[in-house]
Image: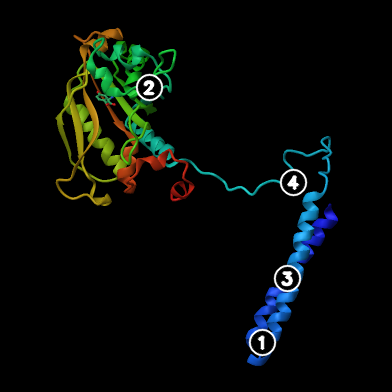
Amino acid sequence: MRADMDELEKLKNELKNISQEASKVRDLPPEKRADFGREINAKKTAILARIAEAERALLDQAVEPLDITAWSGVNEPLPKFYATELGSKHPLMTELDLVAAIYQMMGFDIMESRQLDDEFHMFDSLNFPKEHPARDGYDTFRTEENLIPPAHTSTMQHRVLKKYKSRLDEGKAIAVAVPGRVYRNEDVDATHEHTFYQCEGVYVSRDCTMGQMLGILKDFFEKYYGQELNIRTQPGYFPFTEPSLELLIEKPKNIGGKKGDYLEMLGCGMIHPNVLKMAGIDPTVYHGFAWGGGIDRLVMLKYGLSDVRNFEAGNLSFLREF
Ligand code: DAH
């Protein structure tokens, strides 16, 4: 078999030489060109026929059995290893780490959210009344066992409150940021994905205020975009906060923002007393605020990206840009 392969290789080289020879036609006087061309074509046809024959012969050969007991060490660079390219971190993961690092720098603990959760953490623990239409607003996926791939990182609020409530007894505050992957059963287009990322923030103390929340959020966005910016709020509705707000930021100038260009970035508010109560925290003593917003939007804005679908598409030319 090896010999036939060598023969084929030789014939292919000959064909290459003939093609090179053919280019010499330009140097010939016009009256000699026709004969030269005929000669070259005849050679070419003969070689092509021999190549075809050699290829056919190779195909017709009986498959030689491999010696399956032959040693092939996993670390040895066998010629049959494919050429590979070193991968790199997905841009969303790089940015998610940056978001977590900023919150950490501000004194927050980090707790990652789950990829499969339940009705209680998705809705009940967040003060969604049973059968309330607000539950439908989250377009949740469900497994056959009625588990829910979380539609927001707020599913972690109850766990955060329970895990860290001893801090309150020590006279400290609960301050936790929760980055995580979330899922919604909605139609996908340039600005909507079924799978995306959010980061939640939860803060509880005896005397916290909404002003403190807005200050923290402004500080976060300024650190993330690396420049001062203005914020604005508008009323919102979430069963787990009272009052509820939507926070807008003025598009940072270093990424093309103009004065008065505001973008909605997240939902937030003062944690509803029922949410605190369900986690065993006395709402007459302690108060809290919480927020949650999409990471994908944050990153798209930073890099001027217009199609969220690129993040999940496995499109290498897109990923190589980062
Ligand atoms: N979970 C909400 C969403 O995905 C966003 C949100 C709003 C989170 C208010 C909060 C909050 O923690 O307090 O739409």
The disc labelled 2 sits on which kind of residue?
Phe
The disc labelled 1 sits on which kind of residue?
Arg
Left or right of 89, for residue 111: left
Q: Which residue is mark 4?
A: 78
Q: Secondary structure at mark 1?
A: helix
The yes-or-no answer for disc 2 within 8 Å of ligand 1 is no
On residue 33, the disc is 1
On residue 141, the disc is 2
Depth check, mark 1 against mark 4: the one in front is: 1
Left or right of 210, for residue 165: right
CA–CA distance between discs 1 and 3?
A: 18 Å
Residue 14 visible in the shown view: no
Left or right of 142, for residue 245: left
Residue 141: name its quadrant. Answer: top left
Q: Which residue is mark 3?
A: 45
Q: At 54% across and 44% down in the image, what residue appears?
A: 87
